[in-house]
Image (spheres, rainbow, N blue to C red):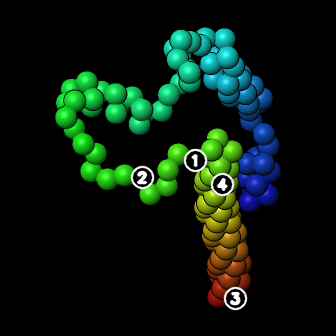
């Protein structure tokens, strides 16, 4: 009976191809949408400015006498350095996320296989004990 349940659980669901296709289509739409619908400001030097520049503009409009609390430790960096730091940050984040997913997946697999072995051993011991008591 355990073998039937195991084979039933291993069979792929019929709608898995549909779900996979829909997910891929959604990802493609999300990736392609910004290419065709440019909502940035075409007149500015950088169409999509960061929140820091927008926030400083709003602060200066509201309070022209505002003085910043501190100055940045490092001055304006060249574009190559900024790109490199961003890539480093993305790589470290992906590594941490991949490690966490792998850790919990491995922990989950080892926990499930251990439980199956314990359940099988308990059922064998129970059957053996029941047979020997008769």
Looking at the rendering, in which quadrant would you find the N terminus? bottom right
The reply to whether dot 4 and dot 1 touch (C-beta < 8 Å) is no
Separation of disc 2 and disc 3 at Cα? 79 Å
Vertical placement of 108 versus 36: above or below? below
Residue 26 picture location, percent across and down: 66, 23
- Give the structural element (helix, strand or loop) at label 3: helix
Residue that numbered label 3 is attached to: 132
Observer-nearest residue: 116 or 48? 48
- Secondary structure of the residue carrying tag 4 is helix
**Tag 1 and tag 3, C-beta contact below 8 Å:** no
| Residue 72 marker | 2
Residue at x 63% of width, y 44% of height: 78
Between discs 1 and 3, the one toward the N terminus: 1
Distance (Cα) linking label 4 and label 1: 15 Å
Q: Which residue is mark 4?
A: 88
Q: In which quarter of the view is residue 124 placed?
A: bottom right
The residue singled out by tag 1 in the image is: 77
Q: Quadrant of the C terminus?
A: bottom right
Q: Tell me if residue 122 can be seen.
A: yes
Disc 1/disc 2 C-alpha distance (Å): 11 Å
- The relative height of residue 76 versus residue 6 in the rendered view (above or below) is above
Q: Indicate whether 60 appears above or below 8.
A: above
- Of labels 1 and 3, the one closer to you: 1
> Disc 3 to disc 4, how far (Cα)?
65 Å
Residue at x-position 79% and y-position 43%: 11
């Amino acid at each position: 009976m355990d073998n039937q349940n195991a084979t039933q659980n291993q069979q792929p669901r019929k709608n898995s191809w549909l779900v996979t296709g829909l997910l891929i289509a959604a990802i493609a739409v999300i990736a392609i949408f910004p290419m065709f619908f440019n909502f940035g400001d075409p007149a500015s030097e950088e169409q999509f400015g960061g929140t820091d520049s927008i926030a400083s503009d709003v602060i200066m409009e509201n309070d022209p006498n505002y003085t910043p609390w501190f100055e940045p430790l490092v001055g304006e960096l060249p574009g190559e350095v900024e790109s490199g730091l961003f890539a480093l940050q993305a790589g470290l984040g992906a590594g941490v996320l991949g490690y966490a997913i792998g850790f919990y997946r491995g922990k989950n697999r080892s926990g499930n296989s251990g439980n199956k072995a314990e359940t099988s051993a308990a059922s064998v011991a129970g059957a053996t004990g029941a047979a020997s008591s008769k």
